[in-house]
């Protein structure tokens, strides 16, 4: 009988050890998700701002909450001066004072104290409305291909330039293409109707620079940044 009781006690001990004594696996750290931008709206004129003066107004930026994010970096760039404003917030909205009658782009980065992954939202452009303006210049063109610093292959000594233009008035009529081996490239093609130019002569091993001037029906123009690329 004593032996039977001993066997039962040992069995209970092993059972308890087997159920509760195992090492727990660490919980996986989930990176923050990408947010969706809400306001200011993409490629539109922002008139829902609090006017502070003839030159400044306050806009409330809004975006969706991202799962597993603990804060957000809001990046707003003046597309005329290329000055970038970055502010961090734990909310899903942020009030910023900006220059009126000025084009901007903005993005939101999701951040987490538990993860080094920080996904960026899409980039949206908008125009902060100004007094007495009835026609707005196009947004500076976005240079797509070749990208900044890219090395591309020339086909039969030719390359293709590809860009994207947008305008709150929707009245872009053409583009001037500047291209060359100097950091201030010369005019290559004037009043191009499409947002691409094929058959551009290029030499292997050469560094090239390019930019785009966008023009609307009212004669307003804007200049893109200057990008450089190498041909191989």
Image (cartoon, grey):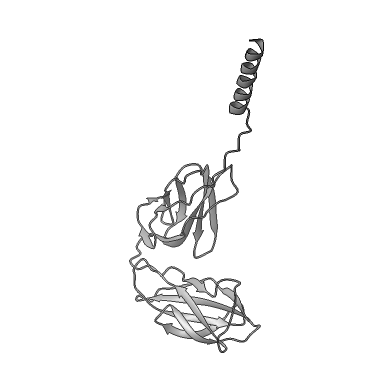
- Is 131 displayed left or right of 200 in the figure? left
In the picture, which quadrant includes the C terminus? bottom right
Q: How many labels does the image show?
A: 0
- Is 191 displayed left or right of 203 in the figure? left
Q: Nearer the viewer, residue 1 or 44?
A: 1
Residue 49 on image: x %, y % = 38, 51
Residue 46 on image: x %, y % = 37, 57
At horizontal 53% and vertical 71% (from top left) the residue drawn is: 225
At horizontal 36% and vertical 66% (from top left) the residue drawn is: 168
At horizontal 65% and vertical 19% (from top left) the residue drawn is: 10
Vertical comparison of 227 with 40: above or below: below
Image quarter of residue 3: top right
At horizontal 57% and vertical 42% (from top left) the residue drawn is: 28
In the picture, which quadrant includes the N terminus? top right
- Is 113 displayed left or right of 53 in the figure? right
Q: Which of 120 and 101 is in front in this view?
A: 120
Q: Which of 49 and 188 is in front in this view?
A: 188
Image quarter of residue 171: bottom left
Residue 163 on image: x %, y % = 47, 74
Outermost residue, top side = 1
- Is 22 displayed left or right of 178 in the figure? right
Residue 2 on image: x %, y % = 66, 10
Outermost residue, front side = 1
């Amino acid at each position: 009988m004593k032996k039977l009781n001993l066997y039962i006690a040992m069995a209970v001990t092993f059972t308890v050890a087997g159920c509760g004594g195992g090492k727990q696996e660490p919980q996986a750290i989930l990176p923050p998700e990408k947010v969706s931008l809400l306001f200011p709206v993409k490629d539109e004129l922002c008139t829902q701002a609090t006017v502070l003066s003839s030159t400044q107004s306050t806009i409330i930026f809004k975006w969706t909450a991202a799962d597993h994010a603990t804060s957000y970096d809001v990046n707003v760039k003046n597309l005329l001066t290329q000055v970038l404003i970055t502010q961090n917030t734990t909310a899903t909205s942020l009030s910023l004072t900006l220059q009126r009658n000025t084009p901007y782009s903005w993005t939101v980065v999701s951040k987490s104290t538990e993860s080094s992954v920080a996904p960026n939202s899409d980039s949206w452009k908008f125009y902060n409305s100004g007094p007495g303006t009835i026609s707005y210049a196009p947004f500076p063109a976005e240079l797509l291909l070749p990208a900044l610093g890219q090395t591309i292959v020339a086909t039969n000594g030719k390359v293709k330039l590809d860009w994207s233009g947008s305008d709150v008035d929707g009245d872009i009529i053409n583009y001037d293409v500047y291209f060359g081996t100097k950091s201030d490239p010369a005019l290559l093609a004037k009043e191009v109707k499409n947002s691409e130019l094929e058959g551009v002569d290029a030499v292997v091993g050469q560094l090239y620079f390019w930019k785009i001037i966008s023009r609307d029906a009212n004669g307003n123009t804007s200049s893109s940044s200057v990008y450089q690329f190498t041909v191989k």
